[in-house]
Image (cartoon, rainbow, N blue to C red):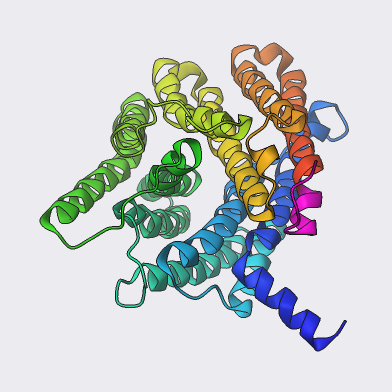
C-alpha cells in the first residue's frame, strides 16, 4: 500500500470514526451476551452477570456512542476530527475493560474505563468550548460532559464503597447504578434531544447562544441533571420505586419538551420509526419498573434492550447509510432492519419472562440472548458490508 493510500485511509477514519467503533461495539456485544446463550442452552453451568452488564454498557454501548460522537461533534461544531492516537486509545480501552472483566480483575477493568473517559472527555470539552468551536453546540449538549461525569463519579463510588465495605456499601450500589444507567441515560437525553428531531423529522436544533433565554434553557437542563443524579441515592437509600419513577420522569420530561417525541416521524423509512420507538422505550422501562417492583430487573430491560440497544443499532444504521449515500435504503423498509426490530422486541419480552416465569429461567435467558444476537446479525448483514465499502453511488 502506497504512502498516499495510507494517508487517505487515516484521514477518512479520523473524519468518520464510526467505521472503527461500530464494528468493535458489535463484537463486544457478542462477548457480553454470547455466554448467556451458552448458559441458557446448557453448554456452560454458570453466567457472569457483572461481566455482562459492564461490557454491554462500557463496551458495546460506549463504542457506538464514541463512534457517533467523534463523527458528529467535529462536524456540528466545525472543529478538528480526533487525532489518530485518540482513536487508538479509545479502541484499546473497551477491549481492555472486557478482557479484565472476564477474568474478574475489576480494578484493572475500571482503570481502562477511566482512561477512556478522560480521553473522550477531553475530546468533547475541546469541541464544546465556544472559544475553539466554529459553531456553537445546541444547549442540550451540556448533557454530554454530564454523562461522562456520571460514569467517572459512579466508577469512583463503586470502588470506594467496595473497598470500605460496611456502612459504605451503599456507595458501591449507588455508583454501580450511575455507571450502568445514568451515563447512557444522560447521553440519550442530551444527544437524543438533538438527533431525534433531526433524524425523524428533519428539524435541526438551534445553536446555543449567550442570551438570557439560552442561559435559562441550560439552567433547566442542569436542574434536570441534578434530579437525575438524585434518583440514584433515592433508589438505593429510600425507595426503589421512587428512584425509578424520578429517573423516568426526568427522561420523559426533557425528551417531550426538547425533542418533542410526542410527534411521530415525518420522514419516510423504517429507521426513523425504529429510532422513535426506541427513544420512547427509554423512559417506559423505568415507569414499568416503578409499576412492577417485583420484576424490576426485567422491566429495566425495556430501557436497556428496547431503548439503549435499539437506539445504538438504529442511529448507527442512519449514520452508515447517510454517510455512504444509500438514500433509498435509508428511506425504505429493508427487511434486515425490520427483522432487527422484531428480534429486539422478542428479546425484551423474553427478558421480562425471566422474572415472571422463573421456573423456565434458562429457556427464557437463552431466548432473550439468542434473539438479541440474531438482531445484531440482521444489522450486520445489511450494514457491515456498506460500512466497510464506504461511500458509493446509490444502489438500484
Left-right relation of 76 to 381: left
Q: Residue 209, position in %: x, y?
A: 22, 61
Locate the N terminus by quadrant. Answer: bottom right
Q: Residue 277, position in %: x, y?
A: 52, 27
Q: Looking at this rendering, what residue extends furthest in the bottom direction?
A: 3
Left-right relation of 272 to 39: left
Q: Residue 3, position in %: x, y?
A: 80, 87
Q: Looking at this rendering, what residue extends furthest in the left direction?
A: 212
Q: Magenta stretch? A: 384-396
Q: Is residue 387 magenta-colored?
A: yes
- For residue 32, which quarter of the picture? top right
Locate the C terminus by quadrant. Answer: top right
Asked whether residue 182 is in view, the answer is yes
Left-right relation of 229 to 73: left
- For residue 135, which quarter of the picture? bottom left
Residue visible at 64% across and 41% down in the picture: 313
Residue visible at 43% across and 70% down in the picture: 78
Residue visible at 63% across and 18% down in the picture: 349
Q: Is residue 228 magenta-colored?
A: no
Tell which of 362 and 78 is nearer to you. Answer: 78
Amino acid at each position: 500500500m502506497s504512502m498516499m493510500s495510507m494517508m487517505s485511509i487515516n484521514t477518512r477514519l479520523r473524519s468518520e470514526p464510526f467505521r472503527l467503533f461500530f464494528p468493535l461495539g458489535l463484537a463486544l456485544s457478542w462477548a457480553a451476551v454470547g455466554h448467556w446463550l451458552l448458559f441458557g442452552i446448557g453448554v456452560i453451568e454458570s453466567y457472569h452477570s457483572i461481566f455482562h452488564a459492564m461490557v454491554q454498557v462500557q463496551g458495546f454501548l460506549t463504542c457506538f456512542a464514541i463512534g457517533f460522537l467523534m463523527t458528529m461533534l467535529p462536524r456540528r461544531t466545525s472543529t478538528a476530527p480526533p487525532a489518530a492516537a485518540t482513536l487508538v486509545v479509545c479502541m484499546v480501552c473497551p477491549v481492555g475493560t472486557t478482557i479484565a472483566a472476564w477474568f474478574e480483575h475489576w480494578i484493572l477493568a475500571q482503570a481502562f474505563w477511566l482512561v477512556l473517559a478522560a480521553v473522550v472527555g477531553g475530546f468533547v470539552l475541546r469541541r464544546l468550548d465556544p472559544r475553539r468551536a466554529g459553531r456553537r453546540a445546541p444547549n442540550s449538549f451540556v448533557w454530554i460532559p454530564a454523562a461522562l461525569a456520571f460514569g467517572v463519579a459512579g466508577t469512583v463510588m463503586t470502588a470506594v464503597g467496595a473497598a470500605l465495605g460496611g456502612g459504605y456499601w451503599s456507595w458501591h450500589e449507588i455508583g454501580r447504578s450511575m455507571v450502568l444507567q445514568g451515563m447512557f441515560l444522560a447521553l440519550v437525553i442530551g444527544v437524543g434531544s438533538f438527533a431525534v428531531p433531526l433524524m425523524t423529522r428533519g428539524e435541526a436544533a438551534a445553536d446555543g447562544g449567550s442570551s438570557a433565554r439560552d442561559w435559562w434553557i441550560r439552567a433547566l437542563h442542569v436542574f434536570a441533571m441534578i434530579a437525575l443524579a438524585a434518583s440514584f441515592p433515592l433508589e438505593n437509600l429510600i425507595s426503589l420505586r421512587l428512584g425509578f419513577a424520578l429517573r423516568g420522569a426526568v427522561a420523559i420530561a426533557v425528551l417531550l419538551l426538547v425533542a418533542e417525541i410526542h410527534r411521530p416521524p415525518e420522514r419516510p423509512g423504517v429507521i426513523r420509526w425504529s429510532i422513535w420507538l426506541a427513544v420512547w422505550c427509554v423512559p417506559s422501562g423505568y415507569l414499568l419498573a416503578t409499576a412492577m417492583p417485583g420484576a424490576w430487573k426485567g422491566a429495566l430491560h425495556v430501557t436497556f434492550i428496547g431503548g439503549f440497544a435499539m437506539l445504538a443499532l438504529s442511529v448507527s444504521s442512519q449514520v452508515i447509510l447517510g454517510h455512504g449515500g444509500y438514500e433509498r435504503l435509508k428511506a425504505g423498509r429493508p427487511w434486515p432492519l425490520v427483522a432487527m426490530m422484531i428480534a429486539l422486541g422478542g428479546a425484551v419480552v423474553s427478558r421480562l419472562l425471566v422474572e415472571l416465569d422463573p421456573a423456565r429461567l434458562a429457556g427464557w435467558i437463552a431466548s432473550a440472548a439468542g434473539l438479541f444476537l440474531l438482531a445484531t446479525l440482521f444489522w450486520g448483514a445489511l450494514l457491515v458490508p456498506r460500512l466497510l465499502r464506504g461511500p458509493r453511488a446509490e444502489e438500484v
